[in-house]
Amino acid sequence: MDAYPATPNYSAPTQPLRMKPWNWVMLVVGVLLMLLGIGLIIAGAVLLSAGAAQRDGQFLTTDAHRYQTTGHAIASPPLTLELEETETAELPPLEDIANFQIRATPVIPDQELFVGVAEATDAAAYLDDVPHAVLEDVTWTQQEQFSDEWTWDTEVDQRLQEVAGSATPAAPAEEDIWVESTTGTGTQDLTFELQEGQWTLVVLNADGTRPVWVDLQAGARTELMDPVSPGLLIAGIVGLVLGIPLLLLGAAGLGRDIDQDHPQQHHGLSPAATTSGAAVPVYPLAFSGHLDGQLSRGLWLVKWLLAIPHYIVLALLWFALVVTTIAAGIVILFTARYPRSLFAFSVGVLRWSWRVGFYGYLALGTDRYPPFTLAHAAYPAELDVPYPAQLSRGLVLVKWWLLALPHILLLGIIAGGGGVVWLGAGNTSASWGFSLLGLLVLIAAIGLLFTGRYMAGLFALVIGLNRWTYRVSTYVLLLRDEYPPFRLDQGPTDPPPYQPAHHETPQPGL
């Protein structure tokens, strides 16, 4: 393996470089179009899947839930259905939009059930002075965060409000108030087409006796999914087709702005330019963080609030960074070179993230507010990566996930938020979870609160943990091929380069 190029030297400007505004506009518009496109594609795919699930007369159903009352009936709250006409378009009738299905199964075998839907006033008159139970407001909830299956909230829908009374209802099948009804033993399916009005669902034993013990399951189907889902998919694809080029052009433009500001930082060294006696840095990442001499005792309590504008911008930038890294990986696969402007953009995002993390809850090393820039600036935390003359084509396919996996697992424990570590230390928000870094920063914060001092040894360790994280980030984001060392280089600045003996061959990363 070739020796590393020397760590870049630069002098930070007193004022941050001003980026061209149209590059920011293209980047932001590209990100928004991509997010919109992804959202539309997901919505279209969900509707397409739901439409396929309800073919052949099938309904999209919830899980069944059990209800029991000592009264004579279980009734739903009145459901009002009303369709307002517009001046520009006449909407289709409700019955052409959707219909519902209620599936009732008696808990007691061979119990004959009656299920019916009536106008709310008729149902209220039928149940007047009859002891029964009313379902409280039913809400919908998602079972798991990333699950497509929706169900009734079990903490709400199993609660019944008992209504007192002394009357016994007439046999429900003999009443003529029902718009739709079904009766019999075993599971009963009641289908109700949407109609304007106010409606109540009532479940009873077929003979009107008490108690009522039943499992209920709701379902719905609509014919609107099939015509809507292709449109959403097409609109989402258009959003991606327009958004990806705008995002890449904007990121490349911002990278060129940085490159023009400090072009020397991207000069890689060819293999011929290195010698066996060249100084070899531990890793080709210039990473520093200098502790302010005077820190506020209590400012850290509100830094999460003060840094919200940065968090918003960084969320946008990290989304763009994922896209540019994928694009750069494709280019490296065919050319063995990282597009220079995208390289500068990627390093700029890491630089901005580190500044905000240093100000915030990755280090709490300064009270100086971070600048809003991707470029170098006069700030106590800095980061840079030398531009590589050449990258391995094959490593692009495996280094960001397979080869980096040992580091990712370790950093998941050390820094917390394994998914964030995977993307490269994008965790600029509070990391006070069950992690070593979060615990150390919390100890430092408590020390500041009571003593106004930040222990030097603790600060050195915190910076060392962040340095390790950002070295792995550099590798995962395809910026360098050199494997990150399994070592903790503490202190505000990188360790001095290793000077091998003349007979030694430099072994980077070991």
Image: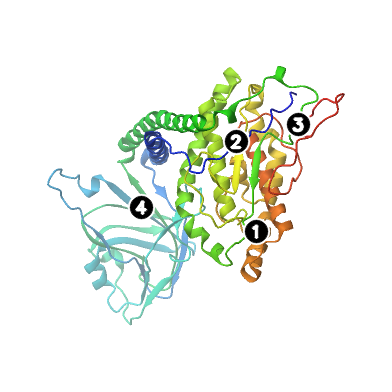
Displayed quadrant of residue 489? top right
Q: Are marks 4 and 3 in contact (CB under 8 Å)?
A: no
The amino acid type of the residue labelled 1 equals: Val
> Of the numbered discs in the image, which one, if any, rests on residue 101?
4
Label 3 – label 1 distance at C-alpha: 31 Å
State the SS at label 1: helix
User: Which numbered disc, 2 or 3, marks the residue that appears first in the sequence?
Assistant: 2
**Other residues around mark 4 within 10 Å, as few (<14) / some (14–19) / many (≥20):** some
Label 2 – label 1 distance at C-alpha: 30 Å
> Of the numbered discs in the image, which one, if any, rests on residue 10?
2
**Quadrant of the drawing holding the C terminus:** top right
Please state the horizontal and vertical placement of residue 118, each as a whole percent of the image.
25, 62
State the SS at label 2: loop
Please state the horizontal and vertical placement of residue 25, each as a whole percent of the image.
37, 37
- Name the front one of labels 2 and 4: 2
State the SS at label 4: strand
Residue 251 placement, left or right of 238: right
The amino acid type of the residue labelled 2 equals: Tyr
> Of the numbered discs in the image, which one, if any, rests on residue 280?
3
Please state the horizontal and vertical placement of residue 209, each as a whole percent of the image.
38, 72
